[in-house]
Amino acid sequence: MSGPQRLAVLVAFTGDGGVERMICNLLQGFVDQGIAVDLLLLKARGRHVDAIPSGVRIVRLDVRTSLFALPAVMAYLRRERPAALLAAKDRAGRVALIARRLTGVDTRVYLRMGMHLSGSLAGKSALRRWSRFLPVRRLYPLADGIITVADAVAVDLARIGGLPAERFHVIRNPSVTGSLAESAEMPSGHPWLDEEQSMPVLLGAGRLRPQKDFTTLLHAFAALRAQRPCRLIILGEGPDRETLQQLASSLGVTDDVDLPGFTDNPYAWMARSRVFVLSSRYEGAPNVLVEALSLGVPVVATDCPSGPAEILDDGRVAPLVPVGDVAAMTAAMRRMLDDPPPPDQLRYAVREYTVAFSSRRYLEAMGFAVDWTDHNQCDQAPC
């Protein structure tokens, strides 16, 4: 009797970001469906390495650059011949496609792409754009399928690579886990949130770098603070910390702004904030936005490429503001403080982002048989 079908997942765990967290969530969903999963780790750094589900077999490659992993991935494919290989992000995808081509195995190869490529390269040199676009044009046509986290990401890649629409599968990130609500009930450890709030707290979160555009958020907060009492917390670490602290000082809001750094449990902070704000210049499908909505927290987001508009149904769920528009962001934050939507309405908006739903959609896209019979949300899945 043959065993379960085997799926290989090729990815680099390089830190404490959203990609690693989403991969761990997907892995759990795959295991729950009875799939034998091998995790091929190009790199194994960050706290999410310890969160890899126990039912997953880990193959550590630990290479300095992705290209150096090619011989090991080729050897793995020849030895194990998994039914399918899912490569997360561009460099892993290149290695997977080249390895399959050189070995000639019949393993199906799928790419998971989360970032809006054109948006991430805005303002970069022509040479930089060419070097990133070339693999899309030359290698991506070799993939059996490309899974993207948002419609706009698929449209962008199809345009760059000249790929047919039927090659793409748009599947929402598995952001909402069973433990998310439990984590949200724990204390945050911050007095502005855990003690009785004398004034509302707005929250931002992400790596402190230009992509997240916390500069615009600080300017918008300063304008809002001039109108009413409120506070702002920005979770995360990164190279822009000193710049942001200096900006808060120059805007005169230092006493009402805190940058406490990285936290293992952002959900406790989200659940106690009055509004979550995503101020990014570009994204793929921002998981933090989905997580905040799943907790019933009002949000404000920039209409950046891509993701926020799809998550927020073009602004029908919550306000979308132009990227870098301080006045619009200020007005949207004030609106969400004064007239927040019902929490149940916000939770319903992200019902397709559960681990069970998303992981099954992934498996279906990769040609695996999926059991939907125990899925109790018939409006989300075949019933």
Image (cartoon, rainbow, N blue to C red):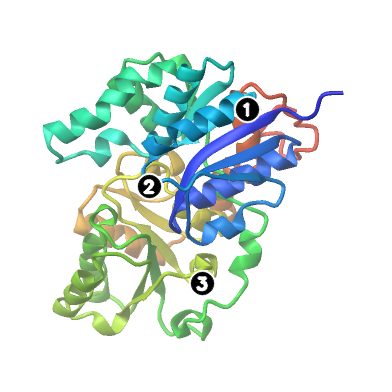
User: Neighbour class for label 1 at 10 Å: few (<14), some, many (≥20)?
Assistant: few
User: Helix, strand, or loop for circle 3?
Assistant: helix
As displayed, is residue 374 above or below residue 60?
A: above
Q: Where is residue 256 in the image (x, y as percent from the top left)?
A: 30, 81
Rendered residue at 35%/52% (across/down): 301
Q: Residue at x 34, y 26 (%)?
A: 157
Res. 64 mark: 2
Q: In this view, does 206 lie to the left or right of 27?
A: left
Tell me: 381 left or right of 204.
right
What's the distance in space between the residues labelled 3 and 1, CA to CA? 50 Å
Name the quadrant of the C terminus: top right
* Viewer-side residue, 339 vs 311: 311
Disc assigned to residue 79: 1
Q: Is residue 259 above or below residue 87?
A: below
Give the mark nearest the N terminus, 3 or 1.
1
**In front of the other: 93 or 175:** 93
